[in-house]
Image (cartoon, rainbow, N blue to C red):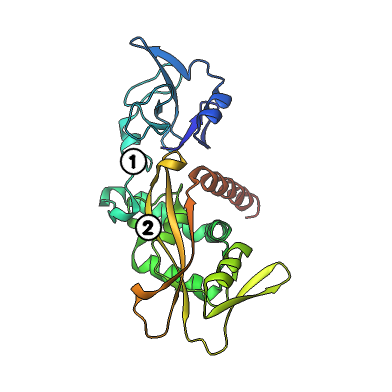
Amino acid sequence: MNVFALITNPTEAIPLTEDIFYSRTNRKPPYIQSFGGKMNSYALCPSCQNPVLMVNRTATETRSGSFYAKHNKGDVPGVAQYHEHKYLNCPLANPARMDEKKRRPPARQGQSDEVKNALIEAFDLVMNFIESDTGVKFQDSIVEDMLDDFSKNRGYEYSAINLYNLPYAFAYMTESKDIFGCSVSKEIADAIGKNSKGFSTKQFHSNYYIKREEGSRSKIRLMFYGHAESVKDGGNEAIIMRIVEVPPGADVDAAEHLYQKKIVLDGAKFFNFYMKRKRRVDMARSKLR
C-alpha cells in the first residue's frame, strides 16, 4: 500500500513516502510506538480505517526494500481498533495485479458496483487524468470505443480495479486505438516527427494534431500494457503507454515503435479528487432538490 491516512482525517489518502510520513506525523506517538523492543510506525488505511504498519522505515525488511504500508491485524493503541470484516472488504488489502485478470467473488459485488458507479458519475475526471498523464487528447469516438472495451471486458468486476487506480485501470483494460487526428503533447509530436515515416503533426496554437503524410496508408496506434510494480519508483504501480506505426498489410508484431512512456499510478491524487467531487455534488444535490 502506497497511501496512508491520519487520525484527524481518516478518509484522506496521503501519498506514502518517508518525508511525507514524517512531516505529517511529526514522528510522535501514537504514530510511533515501541513494541517488543522494536520501534514501529503506524497510521490508518484510508479505505477501511484499520491500522496499518510501515514496512522498511528504518531497516530493510523485504527483498525490494521499498517503503510501504500493510494492514496491521490487531489493535494499535491511540491509532485504531482492528476490524476483520472491514479488512476483508478493503480494496487495498492484498490487492491483485491487473494482469492477473482475477474477478471479484459474488460476495464483493458491492465493490464492483462502486467502481461502475464512480466511472459513470465521474467519467470526465477519469478521462482528465488519463489525458493529462498520457499527453493525448482523445476524440469522442475513441473514448466511446474505450468505454465499449471496458464494458465488454466487464472491467469493473476485476479485483485489481478500485477507486484509487480507476483512471489507469480503465486505460489498461482497453484495446489498442488508432489515434490519427488526435491532439498530442509536444514531446509526443517531436517523437512522431523523428521516428514516423507515415505521420507528422501540425501545430495549431499550443496543440499538435497528428496528420497523415501524403500517400501514407499506415496506421498509428496507442496501447497500454506492462502493469507492474516499479522498484525504481518506490514500489508504486506503473503501466506503459506505447505509440506505434503499423505499415499497410503488416502484422501487429511488425509495428514500428514511435514513443513510449511509463505512467506511475498516483492513487491518492485521483481518490482525493474523486471524493472531493462527490462531496460537492452531494452537497449541491441536497440543496437543489
> Relative to residue 58, is residue 62 drawn left or right?
left
Residue placed at 35% from the left, 50% from the top? 160
- Residue 185 visible from this viewpoint: yes
* Amino acid identity at mark 2: Tyr
Q: Which mark is residue 281?
A: none
Closer to us: 24 or 240: 240
Bin the neighbour count of mark 2 within 10 Å (Cα to Cα): few under 14, some 14-19, many 20 and up.
Answer: many
Q: Which mark is residue 156?
A: 2
Q: Earlier in the sequence, mark 1 or mark 2?
A: 1
* Amino acid identity at mark 1: Asn
Note whether 248 is above or below 255 in the view shown. Answer: below
Q: How many numbered marks are there?
A: 2
Per the image, the residue denoted by label 1 is 89
Closer to us: 278 or 134: 134
Disc 1 versus disc 2: distance between alpha carbons?
A: 16 Å
Local SS, label 2? helix
Residue placed at 57% from the left, 26% from the top? 24
Q: Quadrant of residue 208?
A: bottom right
Bin the neighbour count of mark 1 within 10 Å (Cα to Cα): few under 14, some 14-19, many 20 and up.
Answer: some
